[in-house]
Image (cartoon, helix red, strand yellow):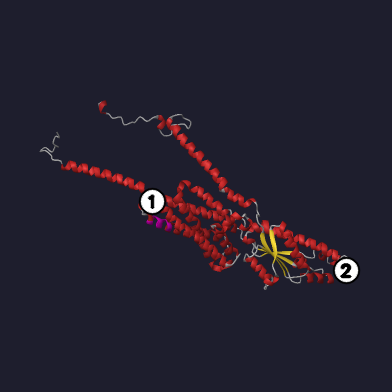
Amino acid sequence: MDDRMSVDTTTDIPATDRPHSSQFLDKTPSIQASRSVYLKILIGGCFAMVLVMFCIFSIYWGALWKIPAHNLSGWVVDFDGETVGNAVVQGLTAGSSSSKVTFRKIPASEFLGGWQEVANRVVEQKAWAAVVVHSNATGALNAAVLSVNSSYDGSEAVTFYGAEARNENAYRSLIRPSVQALLAVVSQEFAQQFVVQLASYSSLSSIARSAPQILTEPISYTTNNLVPFDIPVASAITFVGLIYLLILSFFIAMIGVSAREVSGLQDKLTTGSLIRVRLISVFIAYFMISLFYSVLSRAFQVDFSRKFGDAGFVIFWMVNFVGMLSVGLALEAMITLLTIRFMPFFMIFWIISNVSVCFMPIAVLPNIYRYGYAMPFYNVSGAVRTILFGTKNEHLVGLHFGILIAWTVISMITLPAFQWFMRRESVPDTTGLREEGEKKLTVGQEALRYRTDFPREKHGTLPTLV
């Protein structure tokens, strides 16, 4: 074959433009430009992360920085009304300034049901702790002295009531240590004064020999944990599991974005149809995911029947479902506005702002954290604690549901608004391309019509133009 007839199909490609052929520090124009873009993006991203660390992580650090920034509230109720009661009330109210629980005296007349009503109000979260001086505490002590009662138990005089399951971290690190320390001081001071009073008593030696506890511990206390945090796996449900729930919602948001882009629905559907598809899809996805999330807890033998009986599991499922809607629809709305590129920054903020108000009671945090009462995590955790432990009445569970539904409604308004805004921003570009294409098509059609209508000669050739 003639060499002139051969065609060289190879293209001379510069070595620097061939795939996998360059070094990072090469000085060619192509690599220098690519290296500059790479470093700008990398350094800019790291700088943005530093800003996020100081601006957003500080929310959580600040929540734990000065605990407690405020004392928790406590009650002291004196059903005795005599020497023992007066000593306990005075000791607790005076010592509250150096404690992490501030006690105030509540008249016994407000509790017609006695100590049982006090305990019930602690469970209903009217106070974080309550100390009750039982009726006839002074009379029982005096009778023990007169009869030299060797079976006298001073701990029956006072009872400290708390509810660990309301917030196990606060109960273990703040409430119980503070209250027990105060009561120990009150008991010791009362014992010293009581021994001085009995110094000249004729039966003192007999008491010391037969009933020494009357002298060493004339009054003491009993701790009654009304609602113990006795389900270890509940820690995963009420705190860490909330983060997992948010992460699952984030995954669903990312899957939805990928599904719409790969299928082409993102550009094919009208704005209204796209919004409906997005909302219906996430509602169905959250409904199913929250069910399996709830079943996971049931598989580890979590008892949901303590407060609401057999309906407890269904209520727990609905709490998780509405909780996913409250946090997940916010992600759906923001990913529309921020796009995938900037979504991780909002994700970090959304997690930190929720977690910061769940570890400890908001009452002990700085005032700025009062926003937590309206956050999804706080309300999911509160509702779950009621279901699992019965920490408060069902009316407050309704309040938690209401706040979560409010978040859902807000996101159902913002998501369509953001989608409409972003679609409106992209329409001019699409319109411009369409108009340009139509213009080219019109020009082509005119040229074709001109050639078709031009007179032809006998042999089918166009006449010569002079």
For the point 45% across and 58% down, the residue is 413
Q: Nearer the viewer, residue 253 or 232?
A: 253
**Residue 57 picture location, percent across and down:** 57, 48
Asked if residue 62 lies in the magenta stretch, the reply is no
Q: Say whether residue 163 is left or right of residue 88.
A: left
Q: Say whether residue 245 is left or right of residue 435.
A: right
Asked if residue 274 lies in the magenta stretch, the reply is yes
**Residue 403 picture location, percent across and down:** 52, 61
Q: Residue 377: in sight, yes or no?
A: yes
Extreme bottom residue here?
Answer: 112
- Residue for badge 1: 424
- Residue 203's disc is 2
Dividing the image into 4 quarters, which one contains the N terminus?
top left
For the point 48% across and 37% down, the residue is 40
The crowd level at tag 2 (other Cα within 10 Å; few <14, some 14-19, many 20+) is some
Q: Amino acid at mark 1?
A: Arg
Q: Amino acid at mark 2?
A: Ser
Q: Nearer the viewer, residue 89 or 327?
A: 89
**Residue 8 picture location, percent across and down:** 30, 29
Highlighted magenta segment, given as a residue range: 272-279
**Residue 113 picture location, percent across and down:** 67, 73
Residue 6 drawn above or below residue 138: above
The crowd level at tag 1 (other Cα within 10 Å; few <14, some 14-19, many 20+) is few
